[in-house]
Amino acid sequence: MSNIECSTVFENEAIVFFSQKCYYVLIMKRLFGIAIMVIILATGGFFAWQKGWLGRSSAEEEITLREDLPLAFGAIKSVFGDYKGAESAWLYATEISPLQARSLMNLGDLYRNKFKDYKKAEWAYIAAIERNDASLDPVMLYREFASFYRNSYTEKKELAISVLEQGLQVGSEDNSELLALAGMWAWEDGDFSKAEYFYEQFLLQNPSQEEARKDLDRIRRKELPTQ
């Protein structure tokens, strides 16, 4: 085969490969668009069901749809890596729905884990707590905020246990997780008095936890946890 013939073959193969790649990208874009439409239609169908089955008025449905769509849109943006788009959607949700705190929790996670902007994350968590949204699990909210200080915004690491203590004052039916975290962190910090208190409170709610009872014995002997 001559050099000219080889060149022609290679050019044809390159054209075929390029065409296949373009076709693949086009298909992926179409699938992405379809996925967004399916989610939007599913959301709309859910609200239609709420209206018909639960007897919601059109005004109530419109308010719920207006509040929830930006949350859903932000989640879609985040899944596909458009974090700036997710931020814009959740900021808008925060503005138009002053009583809900889900958008602020999402923003806190976004600023903490994606943007590494800890000052903005701190603002989002504090604002979420201040809204006192009953639809949010307070244990989850205070756990995430305390973990943020403990493991991410370490310049303010000393505030982590204080956040847990604040969460314990909320009066949740099951705050065992906050007690366990507070006890473990106080123990790691060498604050045996606080650690003993938190472990005792944890065992009052969970008397069958033998490992926690063994840890409490070690705390009373002022032994630090094994690394």
Image (spheres, helix red, strand yellow):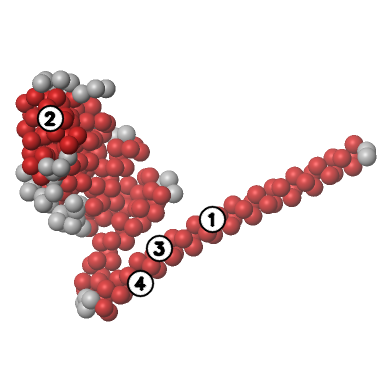
Q: Secondary structure at mark 3?
A: helix
Does 92 sit left or right of 79 as displayed?
left
Q: Earlier in the sequence, mark 4 or mark 1?
A: 1
Q: Earlier in the sequence, mark 4 or mark 3?
A: 3
Q: Amino acid at mark 3?
A: Ile
Towards the viewer: 219 or 94: 219
Q: Is residue 212 above or below residue 55?
A: above
Towards the viewer: 140 or 227: 227
Q: CA distance from mark 4 to mark 3?
A: 10 Å
Within-10-Å neighbours for mark 4: few <14, some 14–19, many 20+: few
Q: Residue at x 62, y 53 (%)?
A: 24
Q: Earlier in the sequence, mark 1 or mark 3?
A: 1
Within-10-Å neighbours for mark 1: few <14, some 14–19, many 20+: few
Which numbered circle lies on residue 216? 2
Q: Amino acid at mark 4?
A: Gly
Towards the viewer: 214 or 57: 214
Q: Amino acid at mark 2?
A: Leu
Within-10-Å neighbours for mark 3: few <14, some 14–19, many 20+: some
| Residue wearing tag 1 | 29
Q: CA distance from mark 2 to mark 4?
A: 53 Å
Q: Are marks 4 and 1 in contact (CB under 8 Å)?
A: no
Q: Amino acid at mark 1?
A: Lys
Which numbered circle lies on residue 45? 4
Q: Secondary structure at mark 1?
A: helix
Q: Secondary structure at mark 2?
A: helix
Q: Residue at x 19, y 53 (%)?
A: 136
Does 82 sit left or right of 225 as displayed?
right
